Amino acid sequence: MFEIAPAKETLMSHDIPDRHWQKVGIDLLTHKSIDYVITVDYFYNFWEIDKINRTTSNAVIKKHFTLFNKLLAKL
């Protein structure tokens, strides 16, 4: 009848970086059979969401190589 709920975990805090793109979070997401890679800059809380054709490590690395080159060109 009743299921025991899993124990809630406490949130883990992290240090805020000193400059943008010093610390990033990366995750993969599939929505309606389309794959995305999500990149978050912890300094500005800036989100970049890109479609990717494959979820292999090589495809994710290539996407980030392109992303970081684009960002460096703006500096």
Image (tube, helix red, strand yellow):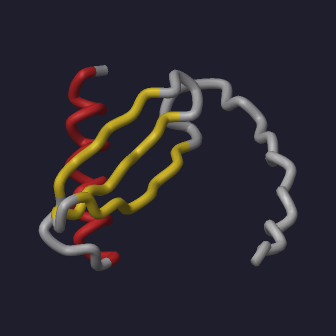
At 22% across and 63% down in the image, what residue appears?
Answer: 35
Q: Is residue 65 above or below residue 61?
A: above
For the C terminus, the quadrant is top left
Q: Is residue 13 left or right of residue 65?
A: right
Residue 49 at x, y = what percent? 28, 43
At 57% across and 33% down in the image, what residue appears?
Answer: 42
Q: Is residue 71 left or right of residue 40?
A: left
Residue 64 at x, y = what percent? 30, 54
At 79% across and 73% down in the image, what residue appears?
Answer: 2
Q: Is residue 5 above or below residue 16?
A: below
Instruction: Give the quarter of the image for residue 16.
Output: top right
Which residue is nearer to you in this view: 37 or 22? Answer: 37
Instruction: Give the quarter of the image for residue 72.
Output: top left
Residue 19 at x, y = what percent? 58, 25
Q: Is residue 70 above or below residue 6?
A: above
Instruction: Give the quarter of the image for residue 3.
Output: bottom right
Residue 27 at x, y = what percent? 44, 58
Which residue is nearer to you in this view: 37 or 41? Answer: 37
Which residue is nearer to you in this view: 24 or 55? Answer: 55
